[in-house]
Image: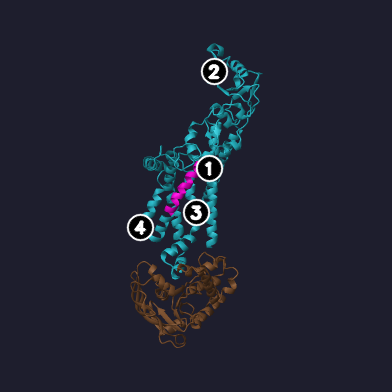
Amino acid sequence: MKKFLEKAVKWLLTASGFVTSVVILLIIGFLFTEGAGLFREPVVEEGYVLALNRENPVSTLTAAEIKAVFDEDVTNWKDLGGDDMEIVPFRLEDADKYFTQEQLGAQYEHAGAAIASLVASTPGMIAFVPGSMVPEGADLNLIEDKNISAGEVFGGKEWFPTATPAPLFGILPLLAGTLWVSLFAILFALPFGISIAVYMSEVASPKVRNFLKPVIELLNGIPSVVYGFFGLIIIVPLLQQVFGLPVGESGLAGSIVLAIMALPTIVTVAEDAMRNCPRTLREASLALGATKWQTIYKVVIPSSMSGIASGVVLGIGRAVGETMAVLMVTGNAAVIPTSILEPLRTIPATIAAELGEAPAGGAHYQSLFLLGVILFFITFFINMCVEFISSRGRAKNS
Amino acid sequence: MEKIEAKDVNFYYGSFHALKGISMEIPQNKVVAFIGPSGCGKSTFLRLFNRMNDLIPGARLEGEICIDGKNIYAPGIQVDELRKEVGMVFQRPNPFPKSIFDNVAYGLRVNGIKDKSFIAHRVEEALRGAALWEEVKDKLNASAYALSGGQQQRLCIARAMAVSPSVLLMDEPASALDPISTAKVEELICELRNEVTIVIVTHNMQQASRVSDKTAFFYMGEMVEYDDTKVIFTNPHKEATQNYITGRFG
């Protein structure tokens, strides 16, 4: 009976371990397949075509060019490698400007032919219409439809996932926003974190430490939305006043909130590392006539460097992946930040904010999964760093 | 001439009375060994000479310890200055996680010496003094952890000697070493006695008889007997000493 029980427990443990691993792998696999789907999506919204006059030599356009054309930022074909002539963009909504209700038909049944003849007779026109409306054999020059390319996504400087006719999925602004906010968060958290750790492990009396340590660890338990709320109510207006900003929601606000959130991790890990610095090393230093502070910065801190570095990198990991608090205070403007005082937007905040409005299976939806993949790689890289640093520390101390 | 003088020393860890009324004199440039069973207070007593026990919360001292006639527990004494004078070698080799050179140079640097050529000169001198120079001269920038245990312990002796102390305290310096390394350390002690006064705590009675000029036997926080090493090991006056050195207890 006992033997059977032990066997059952063993199988139960094996099964739970196995199931968990498989689920994690499935999640990662799901993330990757969904994310990779973006590169199978056409540049122009699915089901639509861009029709040009037969005479127009332009046959390909990138997503950014299409957007510029329809935003009327580019108004001449020669900028796009065509002849010197004005661009006349045409959307389906513009049909009323060119045609009467009778010409289009009650059910828009004549619209296709009408638009086709309009495009055929206007040399500079580019029409964005459903593919099904273009009559067979119409005398038109259709823009070649390509798939979204990796270069446009990873090198693109604009994130306009809902733009028509061609959404832009340049991730650079989001990536830059994430790294920018995290960098400043660490710059703020590092000096404070290390000072608090040194204070707690070396200076504070046991009484103070026993009080302080749980308090700092408590900070880890506060939900991030509460931090975000705090940032929105206190930090954002404060920054607005101090720096005279038009809006207080900025990268700096996000960095400060993240720094506060990363602090407990840095402090706890660094303090543990310093307290684990062997007593014999401290004694050796003191016995040579070093003062307490010389011992701290010449022996204790260097010998616990790997622990401190692990704490810092773990803190960065927290900052990079943090969603809610950042979403609430950074202003969420998807532009490449030039200063920390501007609004910016991070990858996790983008996913959280946009997933609800992205139709499942569409390019926008898949692009958000791709962002998830990128985030996964960033945190994976950070975890590898932690692993590397702490394993090097172990090798050094053994 | 007396280098160290302890006058009626009582020492407490909290309420535990660890050292009971010890008075002794340690002559200059001699090697004095402390022997006794574990927990008898010999290490505690040794660590009073460079105020290493200051670090222990709740520790309390009564009595006086004078080095060169000055009470080192008097108010206004700079502890780090004192520790420059009174070097220490610990039970286990405890080099810093730094290079061999930086280990030996550490004491000089924390004492504010910046002259690079002087530091290099002192490091070589100290390593030669610790009979380690020939073994490490080609790898001074290698980590101290790359050395063997015996080499590490001699490195620690070199590190302590680099700041030119006048007293060297050794807390069971060979207890973690193999016989060959132990022999080297003992040889070193015999050579160093020309430069410094050495106080050594040891569990190994042969070691005490080999290296020391005088020996003190501690038992239960009291100093039972203190005399020339020859007398202690051949003709002790107290029965407890006799029993301990013949191995009847301890």
Q: Which residue is mark 4?
A: A208
Chain letter belonging to callout 1: A
Q: Could you give the CA–CA distance between mark 3 and mark 4, rounded to whole angstroms? A: 25 Å
Residue type beneath disc 2: Ala
Highlighted magenta segment, given as a residue range? A177-193
Asked if badge 1 and badge 3 are on a common chain, one would say: yes
* Secondary structure at numbered mark 2: helix
Chain shown cyan: that is: A
Quick one: label 4 or label 2, which is nearer the N terminus? 2
**Residue where numbered disc 2 is placed:** A95
Query: Residue A310, which numbered label?
Result: 3
Amino acid type of disc 3?
Ser
Q: Report the residue marked by disc 1.
A: A375
Name chain B's colour. brown
Q: Quadrant of residue A69?
A: top right
Query: In the rendered view, would you say A318 is above or below B135?
Result: above
Q: Which image quarter: residue A329?
A: top left
B223 or A15, which lies in front? B223
Helix, strand or loop under label 1: helix
The chain carrying label 2 is A
- Graded by Cα atoms within 10 Å as few (under 14), some (14 to 19) or many (20 or more), the crowding at tag 3 reads many
Q: Does residue A277 appear anywhere in the picture?
A: no
